[in-house]
Amino acid sequence: MHCRLARCVSLNPNIMLPLCLSYLVSYLMTFTPTFPSSIKLQNKQGTIITLIHNFTMSTNTIACMFLFFFLISKSSSLIAKPTVEERYKNWLVQYGRRSHNNTLEMENRFAIYKSNVELIDDFNSQNHSFSLTDNKFADMTNEEFKAMNVFNIEKQDEIKEYYEDFINDPHVLPSNLDWRKKGAVVDVKNQGPCGSCWAFSAVGAVESLTKIKTGKLISLSEQELLDCDVYGNDSGCFGGLLSSAYEFIVNHGSLTTSNNYPYTGKPGTCNKKQVAKKTASINGYKRVIPCNESLLLRAVANQPVSVAITASRSTFQLYSEGIYNDVRCSHDKPDHAVVIVGYGSSGGHDYWIVKNSWGHDWGDAGYIRIARNVPNVKSGVCGIATQPYYPY
């Protein structure tokens, strides 16, 4: 046989390699080496001579076998990776929500996507504790992305009283805890292009407390807060305060369900008829002493806790999985509210389990693990320990 594989591959390696390898395998399968029925091992030299004498294989076959194993080892590099254009087309199929009004806008979106993909690929090629991906925010600039996370910053001196419930708690805490596994966390929701994270964070904590107290897991209404909590520091889609959200729930007696008062993603007129269908109530709320992750840990061991974080970094925008620990994430300028629903450790690294409100198609199925107990970061990574609240 003449080994035609080299010529075959040389035509077009990316296209022909699978066919060529199949051709070579089929040829080699027809070859059966022959060995003697017995070998007399008189000495080392004689043994070698005997094996060569009884092993029949043509020079062409040997050459082809070497080429076969070489191509197998190199096949991954011969198969072309998808181009950025191909990745963008696949991205559009998956997240086909963009409406490009003209060619210029489409080119602009592609340029943004390409820039983000370069960031993603470069970041993922390095040794980090978390990875990035071209998620649904991949064709948005970081400025556009930040516009979705409007959150009024609460001054630290607005609340002078901090609660010390957990300072002298003698109980030994479990090394890891996940309130999702206890059935105390409602499914991930999506706030959409509305700065209503404050409502989702407060409501999420109340949902979990209701489950812990009553045994019933009920999805409550964020829209009630957007429409009806309009006389204090909360401003619907333009941001709000966790403390004000809890004040509203306490003063109005309860929240209704999301089925009774569904989320629309924009402020409307308060529907008093639907609000009257009261479902879940709280007696009040407390604030954990800020910048103390040990006390925050004890609070989370008791129930899920609302917190404010900085979520405006590109690495947060494009987060995929792993333990988030961006050293450039601001620790004192929170712009987003979420819920801590647990904690744990992996490979010697502690983390918080954080429920976001950007849908399942962001992060790790809507969640992010944020590094915990990082040395010399008293406020916690991204300021996660600066403004913790929990209802009771």
Image (spheres, helix red, strand yellow):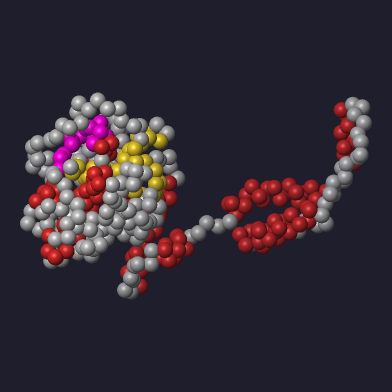
Front-most of residues 50 and 40: 40
Q: For residue 149, which quarter of the picture?
A: bottom left
Per the rendered image, the range of residues in magenta is 285-299
- Image x and y of residue 146, in percent: 24, 54
On the question of residue 130 being in view, the answer is no
Residue pushed farthest bottom?
A: 102
- Give residue 367's position: percent from left, percent from top: 34, 48
Which quadrant is the C terminus positioned in?
Answer: top left
Would you place residue 66 above or below residue 111 in this image? above
Residue 250 x %, y %: 12, 49
Q: Is residue 287 magenta?
A: yes
> Quadrant of residue 322 in the image?
top left
Q: In the figure, 347 relative to 361: above or below?
A: above
Is 81 above or below relative to 54?
below
Q: Nearer the viewer, residue 143 or 9?
A: 143
User: Which residue corresponds to the image point at 28% horizontal and 36% vertical from the top-left?
Assistant: 301
Q: Is residue 219 left or right of residue 118?
A: left
Q: Residue at x 75, y 49 (%)?
A: 65
Query: Considering depth in this image, is 325 or 240 the residue closer to the camera?
Result: 240
Residue 330 percent location from the top left of the image = 24, 42
